[in-house]
Structures are given as structure tokens and as C-alpha cells.
Image (tube, helix red, strand yellow):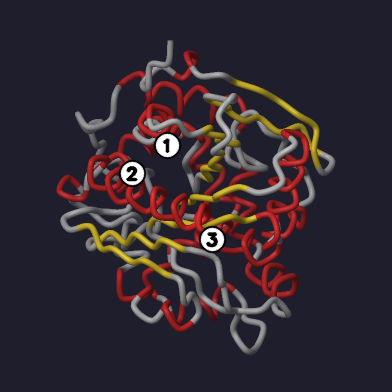
Amino acid sequence: MLEKYNPKSYNHQYCNVNGIRLHYVDENSSSKRPLLLVHGWPDLWIGWREQIPFLVNLGYRVIVPSLRGFGETDAPEDSNQYTSKSVCDDLAGLLDHLELPTITVVGHDWGGFIAWKFTQFYPNRTKAVASFCTPHTPATPVRLTLEQVTTYLPDLRYQLYLVQPEAEEELNTHTREFFSSIFKPIGEMTRPLLDPVTHTFIKGRPAIEKSDALPQQILDYYVEVYNKRGFFGSLNWYKQTENNWDCSKDLSPIIQKPALMVAADKDSALPPSMSEKMKSYVPNLERHVVENSGHWILWEKPEECNAILSQWLEAVDLGSHKI
């Protein structure tokens, strides 16, 4: 029986796609209403724990992969193999393996970025697309480095540290402390992500206790998984700024599919202002802003997220029935 805070209770599966072994969770596989939930960083598939049983109870098939570089999915040594196109090809391969011609894609954080990209790379395989926190933004007119991007978006400057070897070393050494410090509701976030002096997450900073909002079993799972694999693969995602531009610069910026954007009003890295003009690129967009929520909106405000998502999914289903 599915217990949302017990990772072992989920239906874990594996397949070989696009040159890697990919792990995924597949719940309610007999349903003809498939959803693909895509996690971000430093998250894992279990970041959708508040949504998976909820959506299963609504009758959906819920498929939640571990993205390349994360968890039990392979992490290629070549950092150039972590582009958005490579990841979208992984997901298309998963759909092939499951014999699913089309699917509704729902993402959060990097997973939201991938959800939009998948819709661009594979429009014929996308029924609808939704993202929590991460807006769809068209490719810039010119190729930019990560350093240049952070001059326009200074709240993303922490990413400059994530591409340094010191970041991987720190996170591998202080894994439990790292997750205890960042997995908190916005009201408990009492200090910046990086220390303004040392520019580190944990080293040289006072210890922070785990939030009561983070179940011990869930924290232990993150620590166990990252202790086995390390942060190498997942941190390669932050080295793709120029590669991602190269592989997506010729894609149409317009997304015509039914779309949902849910912003968190207190997400400093991805504030609601970033999605205010999305309608010009995503004409069939429904947009919401959840109040008093930070970046971990999926488990910080699960009732609000689930209500918005379920109502939108119902509308998408009704719309498809009319076609």
C-alpha cells in the first residue's frame, strides 16, 4: 500500500533509454490518464510525495522519473550530456518504453524548465504542460554565459558557486546539514542560501535544525540517496547555460498547448514577476500565484497546489473530450 512518506512503498521501475539506465516510479499503471511529474534540484522524485497519492486517488497514472544525474538514474561522466535536449530525449524514451504516445507533463524548479522544453522539442507527444515556480522564457537573442545571465538575474548568483568543484565537495561532505538547512517553509528561512562572506552553504556557518515540516523518513532518504551517488551528476545541470541555448535557439518560442503556471509569491529565485508576461508566449495559459509560499511550494502548500492542479487537469480532460 502506498505510504506517501515511505519511499519503499512506491512502485519502482527501471528501463534503458537514450544510453542510460533510468529509474522511475509508476503508480496506477492501468489508468489511461497518464501524467509525467518532473522534479528539480536538489530534489528527487519523492519531492512529489504530496501529489502522487492525491493524483492516483483521482484516477491518474502517475509516472515520476529520476532525471539523469539524480538518484538511481545514471550520471554520465561527460558534463556535456546534461543538456535540456538530452533530458527531454530521456523522457521521450521513457514514453516509448511505456508505449505512451502522449502525456501531460508537470514540472517544478528544473523540472518546470524541462516541462516547457519537452513541449517545445516534442509537441506531438505533449497533451498539456504545467509548471510550479519555473516560467517559460524564450531563448535570448544571443548566447549568454552563466555569469552574464546572473547579471540580469542576480537572485541566481548562487549558481555561480554550484558550478565550482568546491560546491560538490561541500555538499558531498555536509549532505544532511545541507538538506536540513534548505528544506524549510519560507517562514523558517532565516538566512540567505549562501553565506554573504564565505559564499558557502554550510561550511563556517552555524548548524540549523531540521524543520518539523520535513518528515525524518524523507530527510533520511535524501541523505541516503545522495550519499550513494554524490552531487556530481545533478550539479552538471548548472553547467549547461550555453549548451541549452545552442540546442533550443531555433525552437519556436510559442507554446500552444493547454498550460498551467503556478508561482510562489515568496520565491526569491523565481518570483511571480518572471511569469507575468508569459501569456504572450503561451496563449492557452492559466496562471496562479500561491500566497505565503516559498520555493518548496509542492509540500509547503500541498492543498493549494493540488486544488489548482486537479481543477486544471479536469479542464484539460474536458477540453480533449470536445476535440
Q: Which residue lies furthest to the front in this view?
A: 322
Q: Mark 1 = which residue?
A: 47
Residue 76 at x, y = what percent? 77, 43
Three-letter amino acid code at disc 3? Phe
Up the image or down, 93 lies above or below 54; here it is: below
Residue 7 at x, y = what percent? 46, 19
Q: Distance between the residues labelled 1 and 2?
A: 8 Å
Three-letter amino acid code at disc 1? Gly
Up the image or down, 4 lies above or below 112; here it is: above
Q: Mark 3 = which residue?
A: 113
Assign the N terminus to one quadrant of the image: top left
- Foreground residue among 67 and 177: 67
Q: Distance between the residues labelled 3 and 2?
A: 16 Å
Three-letter amino acid code at disc 2? Leu
Mark 1, other Cα within 10 Å: few <14 / some 14–19 / many ≥20: many
Q: Dots 3 and 2: beta carbons under 8 Å? A: no
Q: In this view, does 140 lie to the left or right of 136?
A: right
User: Which residue: 25% across, 63% down?
Assistant: 289
Q: Dots 1 and 2: beta carbons under 8 Å? A: yes
Q: Residue furthest bottom?
A: 141
- Does label 1 or label 3 sit earlier along the sequence? 1
Q: Is mark 2 on a helix, strand or loop?
A: helix
